[in-house]
Image (cartoon, helix red, strand yellow):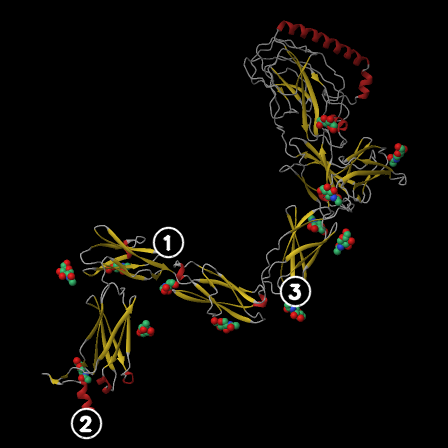
Amino acid sequence: MMIPWLLLVSLFGKSTQDGNGQESGVLHCGAQNLKLTGSDQMILLTWEDTPSCSAVQDVLIYELEVLIADKKEHYDEVAVAPDQIGSTHSWNWTSYLALECASHSVRLRSRYKNHTSQWKQETRPGHETSKAQVYPKDKLFQVGSTATFCCVLPAGEVFGKMSLPEYSSADMNTTRISNQTYALTVHLNQASKYSCTDVKCELIPDVVYGACAYIGYPPNVMDLQCETRDLQSVDCYWTDKDSSLPSKNITEYHLLGSPKICAKWPETRCSQEVRVDARVRNWTLTASNPLGEVKLSDTADLTERVHMFPPEGVTVLSVNARNVSLDWKWTVQQYYNLSLICQVNIINHGENTISEHFGVGLNFAVLNDLIPNWTYNVGIRCRTAQHFWKWSSWSTNVNFHTKGDVPDALDVWMQVMDNQIITIWKMPLANQSHGHIEDYEVTWTKTTQRERQNRTKVAPNNYSLVLSLDTTVGHIVTVTARNINGSSSPSTITIPSSNPDGTKVNTSSIIGSNGSFNLSWSASPTASCGYIVDWCPTLGNCTVEWLKVPPNQTNASIFSKNFKDGLRYTLSVYACTRGAPVLLQRREGYVREKNNPEATSLTARNLKNGSYIFTVKARTAVGECGATSITATLNLLTDNLIGTVFIFLAAVFGLLSLITIVCYRHWTCIKETVYPPIPKPVLTSTGEHGCRHFQVDQCHYSEADITDVPELYCRAGAPINGFVSQENMPFVFSQTPKGYYNQPLKKFTPPPLTLPSTAIPSQPGLPSSPFRREFPNASYNLIMQPGNQQSNFCPELQEATSLERSSDGYQPHDHTETFTTNQTEEDPDSPMSCVSTYILLPQSSSR
Ligand SMILES: *[C@@H]1O[C@H](CO)[C@@H](O)[C@H](O)[C@H]1NC(C)=O
Ligand SMILES: *[C@@H]1O[C@H](CO)[C@@H](O)[C@H](O)[C@H]1NC(C)=O
Ligand SMILES: *[C@@H]1O[C@H](CO)[C@@H](O)[C@H](O)[C@H]1NC(C)=O
Ligand SMILES: *[C@@H]1O[C@H](CO)[C@@H](O)[C@H](O)[C@H]1NC(C)=O
Ligand SMILES: *[C@@H]1O[C@H](CO)[C@@H](O)[C@H](O)[C@H]1NC(C)=O
Ligand SMILES: *[C@@H]1O[C@H](CO)[C@@H](O)[C@H](O)[C@H]1NC(C)=O
Ligand SMILES: *[C@@H]1O[C@H](CO)[C@@H](O)[C@H](O)[C@H]1NC(C)=O
Ligand SMILES: *[C@@H]1O[C@H](CO)[C@@H](O)[C@H](O)[C@H]1NC(C)=O
Ligand SMILES: *[C@@H]1O[C@H](CO)[C@@H](O)[C@H](O)[C@H]1NC(C)=O
Ligand SMILES: *[C@@H]1O[C@H](CO)[C@@H](O)[C@H](O)[C@H]1NC(C)=O
Ligand SMILES: *[C@@H]1O[C@H](CO)[C@@H](O)[C@H](O)[C@H]1NC(C)=O
Ligand SMILES: *[C@@H]1O[C@H](CO)[C@@H](O)[C@H](O)[C@H]1NC(C)=O
């Protein structure tokens, strides 16, 4: 019982009894050999227990106080278990300030059962400087953290302010630590834009001191992907953003936990030798910088992640006209054991075709269906056939030129005109001729006598042959092209006999759109080898163009660079058969109409005295037709005119009298011929359609229906009294009261007039009849309006020296005459206008 008591006496130096009877005393057990060290912002205290502490049988507490610049900043307790008594104790604390900023002191005492020892203190002084300093210097901070910088001034210097120029003052607080030390607390919310962020301390007067702070990010690795290229190592790729740290503290990457640095930022791929086997593994990347460390894994079986190197040494082994063989090498021997797919990219004048090839260790390919005598450029890439991961990059490209061959068969068509057969073929393109064309050979024979062949050669720059043959019998024409390699296979076309009552097809109209015709037709069972669409202008020179259409297609978009706006085209659809092509349908129309069809008047101004013939032609539904002319005499000299008028009147009167007599004599005959008598005089064309006639002359397309005919009107001064006309009359005199100011001077009452038959065209459906017309009562009152209108002759105005005079007598004032027509032929956009004094007669004409 003595030993514990003795121990207790040694533990407590003296025991006193206070007034309340409470026991208190100074504890002898305490700390010794205190050592205060530190770096950056951390202080480290080590101490030992005094020997008297060995009596302690319970937990001994050490109380610690931290003072910064003599100001109490932190309190802590360290509990020492009885078995730890006697060992060296250590304690650390991280200050909010760098240790250089101010003195850091630690006070330490022990406590045991309400007894405490004396305080013991260790001090680590701040940095004494002869010039102002900012701490910490060159320290790394993470974006988002809060940091405190201090400015230590030598005695006598006066503090101004502390700041980070890139930050706003709202993010900063400045505090005074001591007379010579100030602290700035900043919330670091931006990474250093340049190498570092300045921290400034300004003194009064204006002197600035500073330190550098590196504000950046811990690693931020994403999208890790690992693969193998040579089947002997793993290659990993990832992304990582810039940590904004100085290069000496940049992010380092380690693969598979290896201590060896695999890569350093900004490198975001690295490779490491591994045994590649068919096993799923975690491919782990560790990224670390002073602000943090990140681990990322990609789980994969590398045999399913083969990213091949491109083929090397691609060579063209054998070059033929239409095929070549290529071979190449693999730099990785293991590839020869892999089942591969390779693509050959065949570049031909900018167009790409890709062919695919399969095989184990594939190192060759045969390319077929090439164009003879043609330059190609090829590149190859490959991948493993199973477990598609990635294509290799393309090999370097190689060029080759295929050998020449005979030309391709020609695209041949025909055109029959009168007694001529025009065989026409398309110029073989460079990819069809396979070498320079030396000539064409055309052979032809009657379908009835095939054994008797005639043949001729055609120069290489000619693409048609005109043969004057008996078109009432069918012919077979064959064309071949020849180059240095030989003759093409023959292209044969059967030209049908031109049967006068042969099949007729209806012609319907077609409207072009966007500069082309969209044509469709119903399928024909006879079209065993497809369809041929041909087209050419309805009128004028006709060099036929054509398009061949496969049998399963019954529509075509027809476009030609030769298409002209405002020109009428005839399109024909033929069935391609074993024999002659069979015409299926015919269409006519404009690619783009230029046709103001509403225009019915033209005015010619500023004409000189004289006689003019005005010819007006219409582009009707089937083409140009119905040319109508009038003759007008412009004579401002009234005397001359009156004389002329009288002569003309006399002539007409005489002629009419003669005709009346003749008609009277042969009235019975006439009546028999024209029975029943025509109730009203009809002014129309005779016989054939004018248009048709016209067309046959111009072009072999003669089947067209006629839909429209132009009518040429002249406007005169006053309403015609008793004028006999019919609505469909092709040539009508009419008046428009509007715009005429003159007075009727004379009335002309000619006898019934019968004009000779002419080819004036008629409206379709209108019965043909002799051109017969009466002018019982007509009066023309012409006006000339003064004016200095500009001359605007339409090109159709032709000056005529011959002059036909009307019997109309008048005394002109100023006149404006208006020709009312359907349209002009040549220049439908420009109105024809003239100021004239004229006398007119119907002028029948056709072209
Ligand atoms: C600081 O103390 C902690 C425990 O409080 C300890 O884990 C750490 O290792 C100590 N640091 C140093 C440098 O002693
Ligand atoms: C220690 O002192 C506190 C008051 O200071 C008292 O409440 C407590 O009972 C004492 N404990 C012992 C073991 O004396
Ligand atoms: C701090 O400054 C005050 C007045 O500015 C002065 O009274 C005091 O003695 C100074 N303290 C020290 C430690 O220099
Ligand atoms: C600055 O002080 C104000 C008020 O004491 C406080 O609200 C703010 O968070 C402080 N800013 C920083 C960056 O410490
Ligand atoms: C930054 O890099 C330098 C040089 O390698 C090194 O001395 C320093 O300790 C590094 N900083 C940190 C915070 O790791
Ligand atoms: C990969 O790692 C994950 C977790 O890190 C673990 O669950 C998984 O089993 C690992 N897979 C393999 C194939 O090692
Ligand atoms: C390649 O072309 C040549 C000559 O044109 C021919 O004899 C050969 O059969 C062709 N080879 C292949 C694989 O098509
Ligand atoms: C390829 O496969 C053959 C037979 O499977 C084997 O003998 C050879 O070693 C393999 N070569 C390589 C490079 O893997
Ligand atoms: C191949 O075409 C070129 C023109 O591109 C020609 O000069 C050459 O003679 C042709 N070669 C053969 C073999 O046809
Ligand atoms: C071939 O030419 C001969 C003589 O020029 C001519 O009599 C014969 O009709 C021609 N045959 C054919 C099919 O044109
Ligand atoms: C028609 O063609 C001939 C010769 O090809 C040419 O001389 C004439 O000018 C052409 N006519 C028209 C209207 O194009
Ligand atoms: C016609 O047939 C060919 C090949 O048979 C095909 O490629 C094409 O698409 C077909 N066209 C239509 C319009 O059916």
Q: Secondary structure at mark 1?
A: loop
Q: Amino acid at mark 2?
A: Met
User: Disc 2 designates what residue?
Assistant: 2
Horizontally, residue 794 falls left or right of residue 239, namely right
Viewer-proximal residue, 150 or 639? 150
The image quadrant of residue 427 is top right
Q: Secondary structure at mark 2?
A: helix
Q: Residues within 10 Å of mark 2 (few under 14, many from 20)?
A: few
Q: Amino acid at mark 1?
A: Tyr
- Label of residue 398 in the image: none
User: Disc 3 designates what residue?
Assistant: 336
The image quadrant of residue 699 is top right
Q: Is 471 drawn above or below residue 188 in the view shown?
A: above
User: In terms of sequence position, does the residue under pointer 2 or pointer 1 come before the other?
Assistant: 2
Horizontally, residue 17 falls left or right of residue 397, namely left
Q: Is 711 drawn above or below residue 532 in the view shown?
A: above
Q: Position of residue 503 (x, y in %)?
A: 80, 37
Q: Position of residue 203 (x, y in %)?
A: 22, 53
The image quadrant of residue 594 is top right
Q: Residues within 10 Å of mark 1 (few under 14, many from 20)?
A: few
- Label of residue 194 in the image: 1
Horizontally, residue 240 falls left or right of residue 118, namely right
Q: Residues within 10 Å of mark 3 (few under 14, many from 20)?
A: some
Q: Position of residue 533 (x, y in %)?
A: 73, 40
Label 3 C-beta lies within 8 Å of the nearest ligand 8 atom: yes
Viewer-proximal residue, 123 or 653? 123
